[in-house]
Image (tube, rainbow, N blue to C red):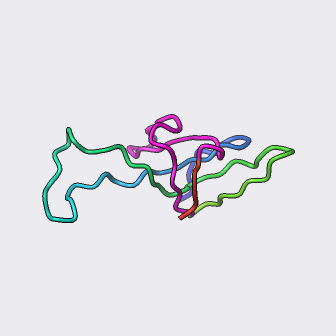
Amino acid sequence: MALKIQPLADRVLVQPQEAETKTASGIYIPDSAKEKPQQGKVVAVGKGKEDHKMTVKVGDTVLYGKYSGSELKFDGKDYLIMREDDILAII
């Protein structure tokens, strides 16, 4: 199924990973204590700008800042739309 959202210019659409529900030692984390995920999968990429070629591509797993991007809900799923400059690394 093709996604109906196409980011413009140097924007990237990221689907955040689910927040961890259990620690490595087996302790369950309540919803109120979960941290905002900082990792996600790129689902759509803009065409870039004249002086800026896009580095990330669809399918890349990326690391971004905790408060980067704008939250968006589409077809019942959560997404973040952000500038490519807000992405810190490709994992």
> In the image, is residue 65 above or below residue 28?
above
Considering every residue shown, the one lying at the far left of the view is 27
Q: Is residue 52 magenta?
A: no
Considering every residue shown, the one lying at the far top of the view is 70
Residue 83 coordinates in the image, percent (x, y): 64, 41
- Which is nearer the eye, 70 or 67? 67
Q: Quadrant of residue 21?
A: bottom left
Q: Quadrant of residue 66?
A: top left
Residue located 76% across and 47% down the image: 48
- Which is nearer the eye, 42 or 2? 42
Residue located 73% across and 54% down the image: 54
Residue located 56% across and 52% down the image: 3
Residue 7 coordinates in the image, percent (x, y): 65, 43
Residue 40 coordinates in the image, percent (x, y): 47, 55
Give the residues drawn in magenta, as a range.
Answer: 60-86
Left or right, 77 with reference to 47: left
> In the image, is residue 51 above or below residue 71?
below
Left or right, 46 with reference to 31: right
Left or right, 16 with reference to 25: right
- Which is nearer the eye, 89 or 59? 89
Left or right, 30 with reference to 50: left
Residue located 65% across and 44% down the image: 85
